[in-house]
Image (tube, rainbow, N blue to C red):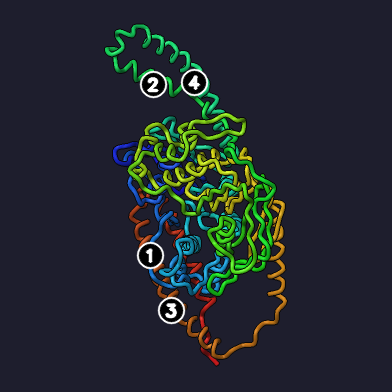
Amino acid sequence: MHLLSLHDVGASVEGRTLFAGASFGLTSDDRVGVVGPNGVGKTTLLRIIIGDRAPDAGRVVPRSGLRIGWLPQEVALPDAAAAAIVAEGDPLARDDEVAALLARLGVPDDLRVAQASGGLRRRVALARTLLAPSDLLVLDEPTNHLDVDTVDWLEEELARRRSGLVLITHDRYVLERSVNRMLDLDAPAPDEPAEVWWHDGTYSSLLEARVERAAARQRSTARARNLYTKEVAWLRRSPKARGTKPRFRVEQAERLRQAAAGDAESQPLELGTGATRLGDEVFTLTDVSLTRGDHRVLDRVDLGIGPGERVGIVGPNGSGKTTLLHVLAGQLTPAEGRVKVGRTVQLAMFEQLATAPPSGASTLDTVLDIAAHVPLKNGERLPAHRLAERFGFDGRTQRTPVELLSGGERRRLALLHLLVAAPNVLLLDEPTNDLDLDTLAVLEDHLDGFEGTLVVASHDRYLLDRLTDRIIAIEGGHLTEHLDWAGYREQMLAARAATEREAAARPAPSSDSARDNAQRQADRRRARQLEQRLARLQQQRERLFAQMVTAASAPQRLMALQDELTMVDADIDRTEDAWLEVAVDDDP
């Protein structure tokens, strides 16, 4: 079923064109992943699709009566219980449906949202969006603040739904398993509008298409090199006339130089670890316990991590992943047990919410304050500005004061500061949050060749699979070890199945008359609400019939009204079914 179409749509911010010429249609069978560098306009495109922002060029034509479910990155929620907020998504949903959805997302249904963390609030918003009936589901970074188990469940939930889907995510497994089409916003050069490429297929096939696109650009790069050589020769021909040479020839030479650089900057680097090499011991935890309030986060834990090891830390939200990293970093002292850190350890930690602090200094100056060069594994030294280029900071951005950078750029800069310091032990806490896929690929390429010890807590399963060779799961204060993410998932599913079997085997609790009376009262209230909704739907149905009579000579308008009537009829059937479930028989 057709949902909406975009015709030559473009968008601008503060006079700068983000993208232009976006033309495509969406149907209920489309499951679209939107990718592209930070700042290219991905979220802006989503806001245009849902009608929250008007395009600066072109038009959007939605189907009449289109229902859109929308999850933005930042969402304002009222001060109410989580269950009440989620129920707003679908007034027809039963209380047990709402409770089950919140439980699956790790949110207590009686949680007061005003007192909740940002991560919990976002999960409440996700639950409300998933519960609401929609023809098109539009999600902006839905995996943020979810643990690996919940991301796995979200994949299954998205596969189960029959509505259209458009999402932005940095989770490559979600892009591989949950979408069938891709929108790639690709800016040919800094400060140029992005081209909107429509690709039929998943993320992996998009990467293949990008390779073909890059090959075409390389052919253009070869031509640019020849032109650049000629242009430089012309500029050097007469030193005396250098100051009077036409400006356009100088600017053309600079553009050709940039084009001639081509993909030379895309080759992965193997980062070194400075002068200090690791000894035989990095971290040893013996009988370590740590309590937060009345919660035992670590309970008599033993753990050893050696030189060159690459360890992934996983577990449910709130299980203590960040706490464990802080213990390793010496930022938290356990109540019991011993933490031993090797004498040669030069440690750097990337915090979950890390961003470079605002400063009047330029981006590059803050990097040079740490080091002018970065050691490579082959013994060479890379100038710091070259590494900055790898992380998406072009010449203009390197000269920009840090206080003028976006939040995503400052997070990238904090990561760059970490790598320039050349530590031999890296502790990373959710490093993929707020990074675009291109920056993620650069980071992974660099960490791939990192010769020190790496410990990373992450919900990004792709990153865990690629960078780690050992998984430590933390839950209930205890640690379990697995070879990889797949082994952890298999154990997790087996434990969940065993819990469900135990619950099914328990005898049903005896009836409680007070509880039964309370349930009957709740059912009566619900039945009255549903009856009022049925009355409104019937009135809407009658209005549509009247409009169809007057639109008999306008086929397109008639088809749109028929589509809307079909949706209203389905809503009536669903409401009647819900009423039958809660209708209370008061006869003795």
Camera sees residue 240: yes
Closer to the N terminus: mark 2 or mark 3?
Answer: 2
Q: Which residue is mark 3?
A: 528
- For disc 3, the neighbor class at 10 Å (few under 14, some 14 to 19, many from 20) is some
Is disc 2 in contact with disc 3, using a CB cutoff of under 8 Å?
no
Residue in the foreground of this view, choosing between 197 and 222: 222
Amino acid found under the numbered disc labelled 3: Arg
Closer to the N terminus: mark 3 or mark 4?
Answer: 4
The quadrant where residue 149 appears: bottom right
User: Could you say where residue 145 lies in the image, as x and y percent from the top left?
Assistant: 51, 57
User: Could you say where residue 567 lies in the image, as x and y percent from the top left?
Assistant: 46, 59
At x 47%, y 43%, the residue is 417
User: Could you say where residue 93 lies in the image, as x and y percent from the top left?
Assistant: 50, 70
Q: Which residue is mark 4?
A: 221
Instruction: Label 4: state its secondary structure.
Output: helix
Q: Which residue is mark 1?
A: 540
